[in-house]
Image: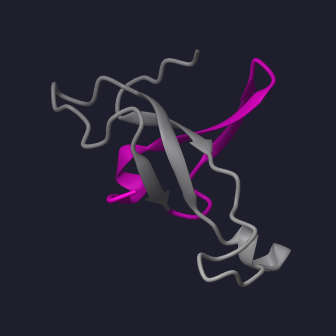
Amino acid sequence: MLKPLHDNVVLEREAPEETTKSGIILSSKDQEKTKTAKVVAVGPGKDDEPLSVDVGDTVVFKSYATTDVEFDEKEYLIIKEEDILAKVEGE
């Protein structure tokens, strides 16, 4: 497993939904806009400040703020905590 350093977070992109909850089929263009992912690893933080996300959280992140990495035949995203915009709650 990847172990991030400092205030970095490793994300695994979730498969985009093909339909909405009401049954509307999404086009591939709509699916590309999905900027959510599940946190799979977190770094120790900076200056002994723990990160505000935990493993298992689903988060929304900034476009173009990630570094794509392939490890053990899986694709991951590495991002700085400051580029995570929100946690998705109530799933």
Residue 79 is situated, as x and y percent measured from the top left of the image, at: 50, 43
Q: Quadrant of the N terminus?
A: top right
Residue found at x 16% / y 32%: 49
Quick one: quadrant of the C terminus?
A: bottom left
In the rendered image, the residue lying farthest to the left is 48
* Residue drawn at the location 32% of the way across and 58% of the way down: 89
Q: Nearer the viewer, residue 56 or 79?
A: 56
* Residues rendered magenta in the picture: 62-91
Q: Locate residue 20, reporting x and y percent.
A: 64, 77
Report the residue at 41% width, 55% height from top: 84
In screen coordinates, is 15 left or right of 91? right
> Dividing the picture into quarters, in which one does residue 71 lie?
top right
Membership of 71 in magenta stretch: yes
* Quarter of the figure with residue 6: top left
Q: Residue 29, relative to residue 79: is it above or below? A: below
Place of residue 22 in the rendered image (x, y in percent of width and height, measured from the top left): 61, 83
Nearest the viewer among 31 and 63 is 31
- 37 displayed left or right of 54: right
Counting from the top left corner in percent of width and height, residue 41 is at 45, 27
Query: Residue at the location (58% across, 62% down)?
Result: 35
The answer to whether residue 64 is left or right of residue 24 is left
Q: Is residue 61 left or right of residue 72?
A: left
Q: Is residue 69 depicted above or below 87 in this figure?
A: above
Relative vertical location of residue 76 with respect to residue 91 in this rendering, above or below: above
What is the image's colouring? one colour
Identify the image quadrant of residue 33: bottom right
Is 71 or 28 nearer to us in this picture? 28
Q: How many marks?
A: 0
Is 86 located above or below residue 27 in the figure? above
